[in-house]
Image (cartoon, rainbow, N blue to C red):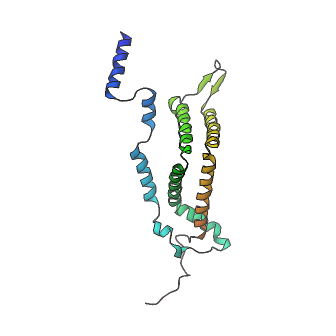
Amino acid sequence: MKSSNAAAASNENESTGEPTGVMAAVLQRLPTAGDVRARFGDLWTKSRPWAEFFNTAAMNKPEMPELRERISQNLQYYAYNYATVFAVLVVFMVLVSPLSILGALAIFALYTYLFVLHPDPWVALGERLTIDNRAKSGIILVFSLVVLWLTGAGATFTSLLAVVGVIALGHAAIRKPPGEADFETAFQPA
């Protein structure tokens, strides 16, 4: 009787076409396309105006004493612009290196298995070994490094970080801070 009720419940879920069990648990935690679009839209709207970001009239060679302060101010002021550049380059990287998608999916699958489907610590070897969340994080780290190395995505990702770092630091160094007075532009009477 019990098994026929379970079969009936299973058939009810199959008739609605909704996933059950593990698949339902995973799908509940995945962001929807609308969520991803909203996050990218939020990133884009929080960015400073791009005309201001690329304004070459506001760029000059900094004096060494002011360089550190200028970089610090500009990195904070244009942080969302730099994050947008990073996001665009990540999309480009994925299009150029599709094998990195498979690596990212493998890492995501392991993360989902370890932290979403089995969030509690594992007890192994008859309670002599407990694998807590810190150990799971170590497992993911080692697995991620191996996968990134095997797919070549590690070098691609490192290159991506280096390119974004050079762009961000270069721009932050030569761009005048937002509140700095402009004494270099010649005054032209009306």
Residue closer to the observer: 141 or 88 = 88
Residue closer to the observer: 17 or 127 = 17
* x and y percentages locating residue 187 in the rendered image: 50, 87
What residue do we see at 53% from left, 35% from top?
A: 109
* Numbered circles on residues, count: 0
As drawn, the residue found furthest toward the top would be 1
On screen, 166 above or below 182? Answer: above
- What quarter of the picture does the N terminus occupy? top left
On screen, 28 above or below 101? Answer: above
With 126 as the anchor, is 108 left or right in this view?
A: left
As drawn, the residue found furthest toward the bottom would be 189
Q: In which quarter of the image is residue 181?
A: bottom right
- What quarter of the picture does the C terminus occupy? bottom left
Q: Quadrant of residue 171?
A: bottom right
* x and y percentages locating residue 156 in the rendered image: 61, 50
Residue closer to the observer: 78 or 154 = 154
Q: Quadrant of residue 168?
A: bottom right
With 159 as the anchor, is 58 left or right in this view?
A: left
What residue do we see at 31% from left, 25% from top?
A: 15
What residue do we see at 59% from left, 70% from top?
A: 174
* x and y percentages locating residue 178 in the rendered image: 52, 70
On screen, 181 above or below 123? Answer: below
What residue do we see at 43% from left, 26% from top?
A: 21
